[in-house]
């Protein structure tokens, strides 16, 4: 029997924005069912890495594969929670409808949501503990509730891979902890790739780590050490496993 391909693989990938290089000769792979934490300095290439997985960008050189396919061929099997998503609080849309948006264009003619789509949206809301919010206007939600709606929207496509780009950057630490616990409970079948600056969160929840700073250093364990951070940030650091900011030493060094 042929083994299933990894969830994500990069093979000698280079990428630049014009004349500015962002990723240099990146090679690594993420096995199916992994919970990968991605960290690194601002501008180091973390979001670019996710956009390559989504097929929103194409590498200058090298190859990216998602579930054994070119990224665009796997799009319907990948959910994405972007770093910044804003809703107009006055826009008249209900929570269920905001989640249903993710189901549009899934191989069927455009039109009203099907019963299957509505069931998928309701399952996703149940997964994020918002089953009772389906008929509530989106503008009535708290920041933490809205963030869970965004995760539900990504889950509504019933993905095999879930990508999250700093999903708690705009919520307080208590809400963030609840969200990370939810993400941990989604496994083990779903591959999760989480970009975060919160070292304490990554130490507690992920099972593997990738440090991104032009290159990628992949570690098949979830323990973040000072040596690992030095690889990513290019300077000695001490791990701080609490608080919402990364490292005071790094903040002072900027």
Image (tube, rainbow, N blue to C red):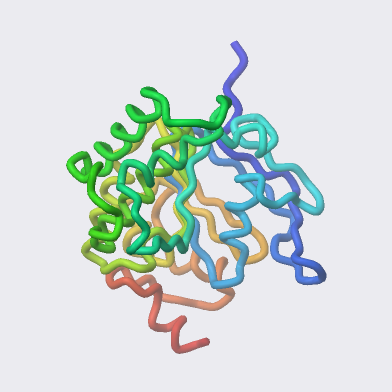
Question: Which one is in front, 107 or 224?
Answer: 107
Where is 181 relative to 234, above or below? above
Which quadrant of the rendered structure holds the N terminus? top right
x, y (%) of residue 129? 21, 43
Q: Residue at x 66, y 60 (%)?
A: 215
In the drawing, does residue 72 fall left or right of residue 224? Answer: right
Where is 85 relative to 111, above or below? below
Residue 155: quarter of image: top left
x, y (%) of residue 62? 78, 46
Count of labels in the image? 0
Q: Residue at x 49, y 56 (%)?
A: 38
Residue 203: quarter of image: bottom left
In the drawing, does residue 27 fall left or right of residue 245? Answer: right
Seen as rendered, the residue at the extreme left is 132
Residue 70: quarter of image: top right
x, y (%) of residue 198? 37, 65
Question: Which one is in front, 90 or 200?
Answer: 90
Where is 238 relative to 91, above or below? below
Q: Residue at x 55, y 33 (%)?
A: 105
In the drawing, does residue 212 fall left or right of residue 39? Answer: right
x, y (%) of residue 207? 40, 46
Question: Which one is in front, 198 or 19?
Answer: 19
Q: Residue at x 45, y 34 (%)?
A: 157
């Amino acid at each position: 029997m042929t083994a299933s391909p990894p969830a994500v693989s990069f093979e000698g990938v280079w990428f630049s924005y014009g004349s500015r290089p962002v990723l240099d000769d990146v090679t690594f792979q993420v096995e199916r069912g992994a919970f990968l934490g991605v960290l690194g300095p601002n501008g180091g290439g973390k979001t670019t890495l996710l956009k390559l997985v989504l097929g929103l960008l194409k590498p200058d050189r090298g190859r990216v594969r998602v579930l054994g396919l070119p990224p665009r061929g796997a799009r319907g099997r990948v959910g994405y929670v972007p770093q910044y998503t804003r809703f107009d609080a006055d826009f008249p849309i209900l929570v269920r409808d905001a989640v249903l948006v993710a189901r549009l264009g899934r191989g069927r003619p455009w039109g009203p949501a099907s019963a299957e789509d509505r069931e998928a949206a309701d399952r996703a809301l149940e997964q994020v503990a918002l089953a009772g919010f389906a008929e509530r206007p989106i503008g009535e939600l708290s920041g933490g509730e809205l963030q869970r709606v965004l995760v539900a929207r990504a889950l509504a496509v019933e993905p095999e891979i879930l990508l999250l780009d700093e999903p708690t950057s705009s919520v307080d630490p208590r809400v963030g902890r609840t969200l990370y616990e939810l993400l941990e409970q989604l496994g083990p079948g779903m591959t999760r790739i989480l970009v975060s600056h919160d070292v304490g969160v990554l130490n507690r929840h992920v099972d593997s780590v990738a440090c991104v700073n032009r290159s990628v250093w992949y570690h098949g364990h979830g323990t973040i050490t000072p040596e690992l951070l030095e690889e990513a940030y290019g300077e000695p650091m001490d791990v701080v496993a609490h608080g919402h900011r990364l490292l005071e030493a790094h903040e002072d060094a900027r």
